[in-house]
Image (cartoon, helix red, strand yellow):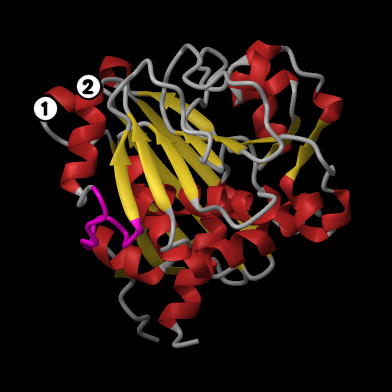
């Protein structure tokens, strides 16, 4: 019996298969499945490459689907003028083990990470956000801008970079000051924060940190009317959100097991992990959300979220 050729999708095709709105819904389901052990997602395997690069192996399985994400992260590629991350996500039939399709790894990672932040906004923000601040100007900032544009098109988005010129360039490339180009994600307004010493506008509802900084890029007093999301710090040595913000907030994470090893913000702040909640519990039962308490949501990612993305892609490919 001749088997069909496995379909391999490039970055653009992968993006079309996993729109943010559908992906947020899939992550909501996957977060509950993972918490209730219906998705198995072991700790990722890290293998060294040349010049400090790493290879990451991340499998996940569920009764309906199995996936394996294999990506290589090579920081030295910046000097070569090529992307830092390369790799693929393979989806398999959970009964036969046959390969179903292959997606672009960096695209899946970027979009499911931004979608997890949007699930955090839907779950934890006290009201529908009107203004966001993105701290960072890299690929993840671009993914988050696209996600905000798809889910909150009436929002104003501020951007803060490691230098004013970076924020200005990021906004200019995506249609700054209200332009609605395809890259801007059709947000109402896109503005750089050009004065590094200026106070963050009081009107900002959601702050999302997207850097690999080793010192806090946000350390404001915790506020009940402002959700803070940390995405970029993914090792114990990295920290984006300062102890002052963390100390005054209720703390939640996407992956409780992974966060204990990777959430540098929380690790360096010396948090009591018994007081850190998982997003799945609140997604399943909103009454568990603490009232009148500022919230910090930390996302570290896991292969279960890649499985969620593959569920969305499979549905799209089947015409569902």
Residue at 73 percent across and 12 percent down: it is 270
Q: Position of residue 118 (x, y in %)?
A: 55, 53
Query: Is residue 144 among what the camera can see?
Result: no
Residue for point 53% across, 18% down: 239
User: What's the mark number on residue 76?
Assistant: 2
Q: Is 252 rendered above or below residue 288?
A: above
Q: Mark 2 and mark 1: span between their CA atoms?
A: 7 Å
Quarter location, residue 29: bottom right
Query: In the image, which disc is placed on residue 80?
Result: 1
* Helix, strand or loop for disc 2: loop
Tell me, yes or no, whether the highlighted magenta stretch contains residue 158: no
Look at 54% across and 70% down and name the residue there: 93
Rendering coords of residue 257 (x, y %):
72, 33
Q: Give the quarter of the image for residue 185.
A: bottom left
Q: Position of residue 143 (x, y in %)?
A: 37, 49
Q: Main secondary structure of the magenta part?
A: loop
Q: Quadrant of the N terminus?
A: bottom left
Residue 96 % position (x, y): 57, 71
Image position of 245 (left or right of 17): right
Q: Are marks 2 and 1 in contact (CB under 8 Å)?
A: yes
Q: Is residue 131 left or right of residue 193?
A: right
Instruction: Please state if 263 lies on the left or on the right of 1 as rendered.
Output: right
Can you tell which mark lies on residue 19?
none
Determine if residue 127 is in view: yes
* Between 28 and 154, the one nearer to me in the picture: 154
Q: Magenta stretch?
A: 177-188
Q: Residue at x 26, y 20 (%)?
A: 163
Q: Residues within 10 Å of mark 2 (few under 14, many from 20)?
A: some
Q: Nearer the viewer, residue 42 or 77?
A: 77
């Amino acid at each position: 019996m001749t088997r069909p050729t496995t379909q391999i999708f490039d970055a653009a095709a992968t993006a079309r298969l996993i729109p943010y709105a559908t992906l947020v819904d899939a992550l909501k389901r996957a977060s509950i499945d993972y918490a209730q052990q219906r998705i198995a997602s072991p700790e990722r395997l890290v293998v060294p490459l040349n010049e400090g690069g790493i290879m990451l192996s991340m499998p996940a399985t569920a009764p309906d689907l199995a996936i394996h994400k294999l990506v290589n992260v090579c920081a030295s590629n910046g000097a070569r003028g090529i992307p830092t991350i390369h790799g693929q996500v393979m989806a398999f039939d959970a009964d036969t083990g046959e390969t179903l399709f292959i997606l672009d790894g960096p695209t899946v990672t970027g979009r499911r990470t931004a979608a997890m932040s949007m699930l955090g906004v839907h779950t934890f923000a006290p009201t529908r956000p009107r203004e966001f601040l993105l701290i960072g100007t890299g690929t993840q900032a671009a993914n988050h801008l696209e996600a905000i544009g798809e889910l909150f098109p009436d929002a104003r988005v501020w951007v803060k970079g490691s230098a004013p010129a970076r924020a200005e360039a990021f906004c200019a490339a995506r249609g700054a000051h209200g332009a609605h180009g395809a890259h801007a994600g059709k947000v109402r307004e896109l503005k750089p924060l050009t004065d590094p010493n200026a106070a963050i506008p009081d009107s900002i509802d959601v702050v999302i940190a997207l850097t690999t900084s080793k010192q806090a890029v946000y350390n404001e007093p915790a506020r009940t009317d402002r959700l803070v999301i940390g995405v970029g710090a993914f090792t114990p040595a990295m920290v984006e959100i300062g102890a002052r913000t963390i100390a005054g907030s209720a703390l939640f994470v996407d992956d409780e097991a992974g966060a204990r090893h990777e959430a540098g913000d929380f690790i360096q702040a010396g948090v009591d992990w018994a007081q850190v909640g998982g997003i799945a519990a609140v997604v399943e039962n909103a009454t568990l959300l603490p009232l009148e308490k500022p919230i910090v949501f930390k996302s570290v990612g896991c292969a279960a979220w890649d499985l969620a993305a593959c569920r969305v892609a499979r549905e799209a490919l089947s015409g569902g």
